[in-house]
Amino acid sequence: SIYGDHSDVMLARGTGVAMVSSFTVQEAHDMAIVSQIATLNSSVPFLHFMDGFRTSHEINRIQLVDDEDLRELMPWEKVEEHRQRALSPLHPCQRGTAQSPDVFMQLVESSNKHYQAVNSIFEKALLDFAHSTGRKYRSFEYHYYGSTMPSIAIVTMGSSVEVVKETLKYLQSDEVCVIGIRLFRPWSANGFCSVLPLSVLRVATLDRTKESGSQGEPIYMDVCASLISCKRGSVYVAGGRYGLGSKDFTPSMVKVVIENVMRENEEHIQHPFTVGINDDVTNLSLPLGKTIVNPLSDDVLECVFWGFGGDGTVGANKESTKIIGDYIKDMSVQAYFEYDAKKSSGYTLSHLRFARAQTLSAPYKIQDGQADFVACHNESYAEANKFDVLRFVKPGGIFFLNTKIASLSPDERLRALEKKLSPNILKTLAFRKVKFYIADAGSLANAYGLKGKINMICMAAFFRLAGVIPFEEAILLLKASITKTYSYRGEDVVRKNHEILDASCSEERLIAIDVPSRWKRARLTEKRRAYLSRHIALIDDAKTKKFVQEIAEPVSHLEGDSIPVSLFLQNAMLGGNMISGTSKFEKRRPNSSGLVPKWNSDSCTQCNQCVAVCPHAVIRPFIVTRDEAEAAPHPDLFTTVKALGSELAGKRYTLQISPLDCTGCTACVEACPESPKALQMQDVEEVLTGGGDENWDYAVSLPERGDLVDKYSLKGSQFQTPLMEFSGACSGCGETPYFKMLTQLFGERMIIANATGCSTIWGGSFPSNPYTVSRKSGRGPSWANSLFEDNAEYGFGMFSSMKHRRERLTANVRELVRIVGLYSNLGDNMSELVSLLDEWLEVRKEKSDRCTLLFDKMKPLFQALLLSGGKTSQSKDLLATDAHDIEKLLTKVWQDRDMFPKLSHWIVGGDGWAYDIGYGGLDHVEAFKSNDINVLVVDTEMYSNTGGQSSKATPIGASVMFSKGGKSQKKKNIGLIFMSYEHCYVASVCLSNQSQLVQALVEADHYDGPSFVVAYAPCIQQQVRPEGLNDMFDECR
């Protein structure tokens, strides 16, 4: 998981660091100071941590410690001591020696006194901090809101402490208290027991990690050991897990934890337990029920915003939160954001809370039915089979929808809304008496040259409807924010945003909809239901259909929390396995531009350059017969022309586009070399109305005819079905065309080791897998993701193990051929098999599909012989020992059958991995001629996946994160470095020279030794002007 829990922190327990946990955003600031003081005074390294995402990415108001107070708190004499311990030739010393068994243990134990002193030093630092700031903390925080003495304690750490604390305050429970762990290491048993009331008879521990095979997770084990050492072993302890992978931890979960540990008989208490999931396999989970516990008071304003990745919603919400917090000094603000892993064009969810004269401590998402204001900035989310965008809204709340329907006449709006919106949403609007408003932000943004950037328009609507601050003041503050935020992009961008904000302020642009009572009876028609589930009907594989219905569909609707554990096992997902080709069932309608390409066959020369550059494999050429063209669902739109080339004599050529998968990037139009262009953009709704999606489904069902052409040419490669399609990449992504082409050239014999980065997110975000298999053979790329820093070693390990296995296979095949060759008349199957094996031995090193095709012929022969127990037609002189050896060798060869193809090993990743962090391992792979491994680096010239930070691949003068004033040094010439290894094949490629790209990839694969291909890949983070990644192909030039 790329998300946050305590798993990584717990791995650091054995390193000897002291460990301090922060519960809130304020504490993250405060504990950083306290930890610095304590580490200086104790000479013990401190690891200060907080909950990833939940705390690290939350926006909240905090009180800063000013510099004067900070100076007074710092133990400057200890700072000087620390500096004097630094290595210096003025007082030389040696550290890091190799210590032998006779002294190592003593040296380790000599630090005991330092660790024994940490607890008191840390407590002293907390007291000094409290004296300076007035904010009091303890190593173990105890909170109780009852009126007597508690009998139950919940022990936890991190942001969950605040969730438990606020829930107990709301419940006013006499029985339950909470103990929050701040200083986790060194653990103080006496310190823990001193805050645990003597009245407590039962304890529930909550760990945000899982240690498989252990008797319990870390907090559980520490608590149990502490109770025993303090002579309180009679206290019952139930250990639980929660929040793995940043799963939300809510007050409702706290309530069921309390109910579990309060059961009358201890034998009925669930231990161990999990909360937040449905574990119907080992039955450890606590059922949540339907009751929602909301500890927040009614005067807390809760707002939810549904956004579209790249539309500016998240950025605008961050800014509006800061604007409101700065404008109203007694206003508490809290903002938290959810992101789809699919980068730009994925969904975003913003959770904002505002409250006057009170502290907001609610580190959990806004719960169902609790939001005062809900905004949906992408109208497609409100369609049937998308998201339940109104699940958050409370009765009488406000719902704002950005939709083109707002531009229609009043008479047409209601009919259009009824046709557009999900019946569930219509019912919710009616039953909950929601105040409903619409506006057409997209058209307004287009009119001002800010296509797709609807954030400021929607923010104006929010300030008008929510009434958090006076609307006129809000607009002035937004303008000041625009100037500050976008000034580095130029005056033109600032001016356009100011103008669009002024235009959006007019009341007529925000339209109130009177919700009719008939919406209470809204329902999904059978025709509409069939249309929405048509992608399921198209699946002919039972295994895939089961996965899509039981796993992919709920996840895509943001209902993954409800999937029980058993369904993952039933879908063979133990260990994280994913079936291939699931991205094809995940559609992009509508894309943010609302446009898709239209083919003009009269201008087309069938060069297939547009196909090669398409980032999402949504535009493809098909070789068809005239009869097939006439049988298309909509033959008038299924345009074909005579296929060019003698090898395609008598065939027709057609170019088809998938309107439900296209992102509207226009890269294909830019790539077309013809004049006039053979492609123009048109409205996607026109294509869908004309049956464009049905024509696409028909085209991909036709026989594949890529084997009629030379697949190692540019044109021929694009007739091969891509085995990487419909990824979650940004619109116009510059990385994916390279991966797509790799799969077209070598996909059926390809092994991929992928470095964590953009290629992981668009290529391996559960449950969407863009890597698919050939319909003819069932073969396709096998892909696995590595850590960011060790991908080269990861891929090298794959290659080494498979090289060893293939050598073993070769030895066994040789021996089998030798023994069988001693005899005649061992049967037709054996004779034919040995003939094929003999041919395989001759061509086994050939870098092509030939070995794979030979295995296809061998497979039924192997199966027939193994089915008969390896027995052959007996020759009169066949020795019993040889018969036994033949049977044994047949089994051994069959066990290594996946080594018959000549595998194409590829190590792939971005420039952050190759140029920077993973360079050492990459150099090791390229340094040895015996490593027959291919490396593809997609060079975006920055750390694209983490926000566009500068890397060694960033060119001089480029303005990127951490180098806003322009990078001061030249780009690392990694290709030239690897050219110093004379045995290494090196190529630099770009999408603007596609023939050279194909040639380089083929040469790299066919080269007997290490290859290195660096591919320039434009990225949305480069802020390419004027049309972003719509200019991707021109940017490559």
Image: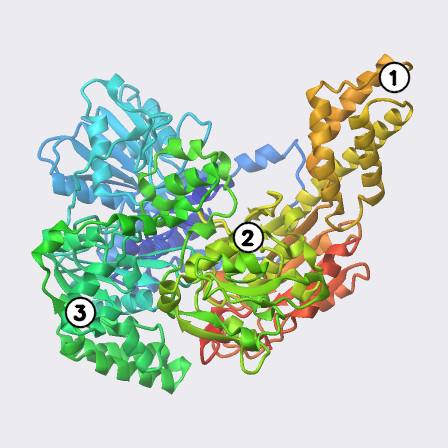
Q: Residue at x 49, y 49 (%)?
A: 769
- Left or right: where 704 falls relative to 360: right
Residue kind at label 1, given as amino acid type: Ser
Horizontal side of 852 relative to 773 (left or right) equals right
Circle 3: element type: helix
Pointer 2 or 1: first along the chain:
2
Drawn side of residue 509 relative to residue 755, left or right: left
Q: Residues within 10 Å of mark 2 (few under 14, many from 20)?
A: few
Residue 339 in the image: state x and y as whole percent. 36, 56
648 or 812: nearer the eye?
Answer: 648
The amino acid on which the numbered mark 3 sits, given as a three-letter code, is Glu
500 lies above or below 459? below
**Residue holding disc 1:** 875
Residue 99: image x %, image y %?
A: 66, 39
Pointers 1 and 3 in contact (C-beta within 8 Å): no
Which of marks 3 and 1 precedes in the sequence? 3
Residue pointed to by mark 3: 412
Residue 961 seen in the figure:
no
**Mark 2 vs mark 1, CA separation in Å:** 49 Å
Residue 1024 point in image, percent of width and height:
48, 76
Residue 560, by quadrant, is top left
Q: Quadrant of the C terminus?
A: bottom right
Colour mode of the rendering: rainbow
The crowd level at tag 3 (other Cα within 10 Å; few <14, some 14-19, many 20+) is few
**Which residue in the protein does label 2 denote?**
702
